[in-house]
Amino acid sequence: MQARGQVRANALTVDVEDYFQVLAMAPYVRRDQWDRWPCRVEASMDRLLQLCADHRVYGTFFTLGWVAERYPHIVRRIVAAGHELASHGHGHERVWEIGPRAFREDLLRARQLLEDIGGVAVTGYRAPAFSIGPRTPWAREILLETGHTYSSSVYPIRHDHYGEPDAPRQAHWPDGPGGLMEIPPATLRVFGRHLPAGGGGYFRLLPYRASRGALRWISQVEGQPAVFYIHPWELDAEQPRIPGIDLRTRFRHYLNLGRTEERLRCLFKDLPWDRIDRVFAAELAGARDWPAGQEVAAQAV
Ligand SMILES: [Zn+2]
């Protein structure tokens, strides 16, 4: 899978959405009023894409259909810069809340839009708020039917909004060969528990060295690529404040926004990064070769 002495890249992933679409904000921002909030995703994506270009880093951009429809140039820039274009669905609703029928429609709508605008095949998907798990036993089959080959939608941690703490920590095929591949965000296993190490709010909360140490441990000691995720709004300290939100949401969303860009710069310098479809190329090909698939699934503890 990897030449001796060669360091395998980690996977950089970006959920392309605007600050008012975050699901923790849903009780305070009406979906039918999204168009009334000032758009910040264009400027934040400019910064993020420039940061990637400065460091020659490539990643996978799980892009919301809603964003692609209104700002198609963002999609074209992602593709032109050499990144992998993937789907974050269309309307940014939790999969277990909308049910199988609406999920299917949401997937098809987003994939069609992204492929038409981007001019490339879209085969990867990340569920809004990691909302695929025991409550959505139908989700993987629908993802396969609608042309997806992998998902990065199950976060194997305990969290009040999402997470499936007993799910495997590493890339695996939940339904066996030929099924959908699940590529979870990075976690550390400490005293039998899985701790989040894959980005998001934790990247802003913890000191940079702690994040880097965890990611290095996964890639260098465990020998597995770490999957890291970030949102464009996490680089935007000047984003409009949403009024009336509860203390916990306010803390999680606005904490250390001003430090994200510098931390990302360090992360891009300190560790190797690439797109999911290249980092996991062997495993994705292994879906057609069950012995290789078994080996990876057996490591997934
Ligand atoms: Zn999202």
Image (cartoon, rainbow, N blue to C red):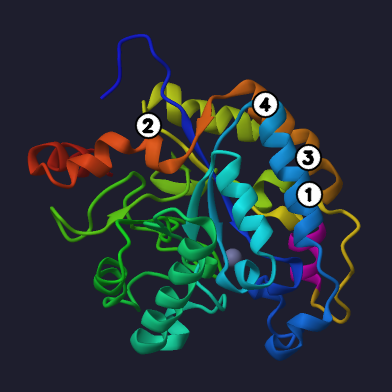
Q: Position of residue 200 (x, y in %)?
A: 63, 52
Q: Quadrant of residue 284?
A: top left
Residue 55: which disc?
A: 4
Q: Main secondary structure of the magenta part?
A: helix
- Give the labeled residue for mark 2: 224
Under mark 1, the amino acid is: Leu
Disc 2 is placed on an element classified as loop
CB of mark 2 near ligand 1 (< 8 Å): no
Residue 16 lies, with reference to residue 276, above or below; the image says below
Question: For the magenta stretch, what is the residue range?
Answer: 247-255
Horizontal side of residue 2 vs 236, given as left or right: left
Residue 219 lies, with reference to residue 261, above or below; the image says above
Under mark 2, the amino acid is: Gln
Q: Position of residue 166 (x, y in %)?
A: 34, 58
Does the magenta segment cover residue 252? yes
- Tell me the mark number nearer the camera, choosing from 2 and 3: 3
- Tell me the mark number nearer the camera, choosing from 3 and 4: 4
Does the magenta segment cover residue 47? no
Residue at image location 25% in from the left, 39% down from the top:
283
Can you say which quadrant of the picture contains the C terminus? top left
Under mark 3, the amino acid is: Glu
- Tell me the mark number nearer the camera, choosing from 4 and 1: 4
**Residues at circles 2 and 1 in contact by the CB criterion of under 8 Å:** no
Q: Which badge, 1 or 3, comes first in the chain's sequence?
A: 1
Under mark 4, the amino acid is: His
Q: Residues within 10 Å of mark 3 (few under 14, many from 20)?
A: some
- Give the labeled residue for mark 3: 261
For the view shown, which residue lies furthest in the top direction?
Answer: 5
User: In terms of depth relative to the viewer, which is nearer, 232 or 83?
Assistant: 83
**Ligand 1 - quadrant of the structure image:** bottom right
**Residues at circles 1 and 3 in contact by the CB criterion of under 8 Å:** yes
- Give the labeled residue for mark 1: 235
